[in-house]
Image: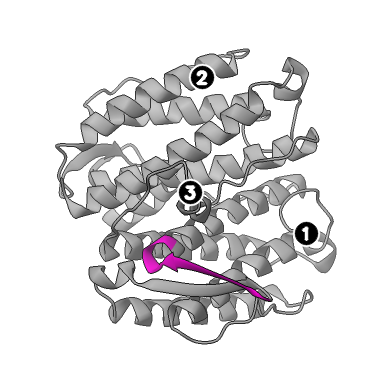
Amino acid sequence: MSQQLTTLRALFVHNDWARDKLLDTARPLADAALDDPVQMGPGSLRATLEHLYRTERWWLDRWQGSADPLEAPEPGISVSELHSRFRATATERNAFLDDRDEAEQIACTTDTGGSLRLALSDMMLHVCNHGFHHRAQAVNMLRQVDVKAPDIDYLYITLDPSVKFDPSYELDLIRAYYQYNDWARERVLKVVAPLDDDELDRPFKIGMGTLRKTLLHIRDAEQWWLLNWSGESADLFAELPETTPIGGLRKETAEIARHRRELFDTLGDGDLTRTVTASPRPGVEMSFKLGDAMVQLGGHGTHHRAQALNMLRRLDVEGPGIDLADWAKESAQG
């Protein structure tokens, strides 16, 4: 098994762990809560969980050579049945991972109907990132029906004593994940830039409460983690002012991304196992592998951009396409 696919296996372990926590929380809910219409994602909690399953199934079929279209939605499917299908697909996927090579490629169709070949590892990373995106929506849907959502950030699996989780990491894959994150961030900020203060600061019961605060939170987390990775002292989220204009935010985040790339250039795979100690709040210190923290922050950005896209939808603004698969296709086409 390649080191790169070993890294992806860790991402899939988290994917399945987080999925199970959401399904366990959703299983006792009545149909009214599962199907409560929500102006985000696929439109309801059940539809979002079902969409996650269909997408995982479709991509695994594609990796194994199938060209069948995405299955039609199944309204009313039970959470227990979804759980059974998810687990069967995960078992099949894990067996598939055992004899794959990081250089393997699969055929994809471009937006204009052409064809190109993409790295299998990129498409697997897309599926994991797609999970981060839609689980963010599911968490908000649970909150809107007054259900406590489980803590499913990547770092939480490292703290779960019931899970045997001791992954190794590969720098090239993590570097690629941040190339995607930087691309997605810029696409969102470009769409947000023309909005006025009333739109940026309109209150929502998702994310950090407003579009501007949500985008600022992504930046603040990136700055805080970068300082921790670099061995510098980092107070909890040295936040930019809540009135920061989007132009200023774009400059700040571009500078953070530049420093992060410079840090990556000094690292090797072995560095990703070293311990990073961070203080999330006064008097509390927590230690993680550098690789754990880097994957956490990548998923954190995807999680909050999902919320930002839903805020744009409610502002009647068309959000940009930011699927990792779109980034991979654009990168492959130069």
270 is higher (above) or lower (below) than 50:
below
Q: Earlier in the sequence, mark 1 or mark 3?
A: 3
Mark 3 or mark 2, whichever is nearer to me: 3
Residue interval drawn in magenta: 283-292
Label at residue 210: 1
Q: Quadrant of the C terminus?
A: bottom left
Rendered location of residue 190, percent (x, y):
59, 65
Towards the viewer: 215 or 140: 140
Residue type, mark 1 in image = Thr
Residue 47 is left or right of residue 198, and the answer is left
Q: Main secondary structure of the magenta part?
A: strand
Q: Name which quarter of the figure residue 66 lies in.
A: top left
Horizontal and vertical percent for residue 174?
34, 62
Q: Nearer the viewer, residue 144 or 14?
A: 14
User: Callout 2: few (<14), some (14-19), or many (20+) C-alpha neighbours within 10 Å?
Assistant: some
Q: CA distance from mark 3 to mark 2?
A: 22 Å
Numbered tag placed on residue 110 in the rendering: none
